[in-house]
Amino acid sequence: MKKAAIIGAGLGGLSASIYLKAKGWDVDVYEAQSFPGGKAAEEYFDGYRFDTGPSLVTMPWVFEDVFQTAGKDVHQELTLVKLEEICTYYLSDGRYLKAWADTEEFGFELEKIVPGSQNSFKKYLKEAEKVHSLGGNFFLTQAIHEIRNLIKPSVLLKLIRFAGIHPFSTLNKLNTKFFKDPRIVQLFNRYATYNGSDPYQTPATMIIIPFIEYIGGGYGIKEGIFEIPKKIHKAAEELGVHFIFGQRVEKINVQKKKILGINTASNDIDYDVVISNADVLYTYDTLLNLPNSKEAKRYRKLEPSSSGIVFYWGINRTFKELSVNNIFFSSNYTAEFKAMFEDNIMAEEPTVYVNITSKLTPTDAPKDCENWFVLLNAPSNQNQDWDLLVSNARNAAINLLSKRLGTNIKSHIVTEGILTPPEIEKRTGSKYGSLYGISSNSVTSAFMRHRNRSKRIKGLYFCGGSAHPGGGMPLVLLSGKICANLVEKYSGE
Ligand SMILES: Cc1cc2nc3c(=O)[nH]c(=O)nc-3n(C[C@H](O)[C@H](O)[C@H](O)COP(=O)(O)OP(=O)(O)OC[C@H]3O[C@@H](n4cnc5c(N)ncnc54)[C@H](O)[C@@H]3O)c2cc1C
């Protein structure tokens, strides 16, 4: 049996382990932390439970496929709750609307705010469906860097047609064509942040993100998001994958451009294949000791996606007007993205996202209380003065939330945890603390993410947010599957 080592039990590494084991490989997963999940972890503060990172599940079919490959049914393992109210939006003028999963209902809500926007929304979804059907799934499920994929005539045709769909326009420009009111444009511009990008730069093809959310649905997990990696880990273990937790891989051993194995602090172990679920740049700089390689130099030049500051607040009361997911928009969205991507600072008045899982799972907070996961988009870590930025961001979030909800939020915070970009970098090894690898702020970004199979080193593969097809839970799960398929395809060479 051929032997593979996977470095990291993030969702990408966990997925790769299942797909590869199912193909008959002997798979060992090395994880530096004592638990699986990477960014998708969990913390408790004074009786309040919080998922530390991801909060919204999309593309449920991707999760179904991972579990099915391990001989399990995701719906037996996890309670996926389709959110009827996907998000409550507090617009910049203080009015609010509910984004219902039922797109007709959501259209009515939009119409109440801006007459005519119900019809625009219908047209918008049609356009999104067109873009999605022409290229969306292809980009997300294929190893696009493999030249043999690219030259298949059917694939080439798809690519050319995909390129005809607004590749040189931005999401903001496209949204402005469909919606005349800046408040509604802001709402749909927000989808650029789903992969840590800037709506004023990211290509209009990102219109597939709202399509995926409105057509495929947005879900919460009753047991908490952290249960996803826990259950995938359990399924992988039952399949025969071997996990070594609390074990950092120090080095990937290579001889004559071919994988030899890995080094941990205590062992050198031989493997036929190594899959790195760790950050691509960290893999080149540290694990391969190739900081001057072409790949590392190229990757270093690419713009990182945004990071985030998260406040985990225990709140001593409930807010009936809020949903599981809530967005409180700033009054100047352009300034927010300029601050983040040009000036590497926090905007004075950032948009605030509040996720409250106790609305779904009351035991996540004490009785008559709520657990607020408060996320502010933040620049990547470039060694800014984070104490100052976090303190300003905290004040700004409290001011905006207090204004919109008509109560002094500060007086309701009874416990607090904080996650910062440097801390994200320290905990998960993500370079610059970026949440989604590189940004999608250019038309070529989709092709600039690192390939899933190394061209330089035979037997080396990459999965996770910094590799193709990018960050976000479903995408990293797909990257694990792509990797396993490539390992099988090239293992005979
Ligand atoms: C605040 C926040 C909010 C988010 N919101 C959402 C959301 O709502 N929806 C969504 O879909 N996604 C969201 N994401 C993104 C999502 O969490 C990530 O894209 C995804 O979880 C990353 O998975 P990954 O496979 O890249 O691995 P990571 O989670 O980055 O994990 C990598 C793992 O590798 C381990 N590792 C690294 N180096 C070594 C080594 N040398 N030896 C051993 N182990 C090593 C690390 O310890 C870590 O466990 C969010 C992320 C954050 C932080």
Image: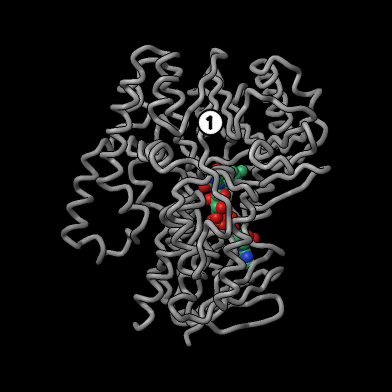
Most foreground residue, 69 or 196? 69
Q: Secondary structure at mark 1?
A: strand
Q: Residue at x 57, y 28 (%)?
A: 327
Question: Quick one: 42 or 142, which is closer to the camera?
Answer: 42
Q: How many marks?
A: 1
Residue at the extreme bottom of the image, as rendered: 1
Q: Is residue 274 above or below residue 462?
A: below
In this rendering, position of residue 87 left or right of residue 47: left
For mark 1, what is the residue?
87
Q: Position of residue 133 (x, y in %)?
A: 27, 45
Identify the residue shown where x is 69% and y is 71%: 247
Q: Residues within 10 Å of mark 1 (few under 14, many from 20)?
A: many
Name the quadrant where ligand 1 sits.
bottom right
What amino acid is labelled 1 in the image? Cys
- Indicate the position of residue 426 as horizontal and vertical percent values: 68, 53
Q: Which residue is located at x 54 percent, y 32 percent?
A: 340
Q: Residue at x 35, y 61 (%)?
A: 143
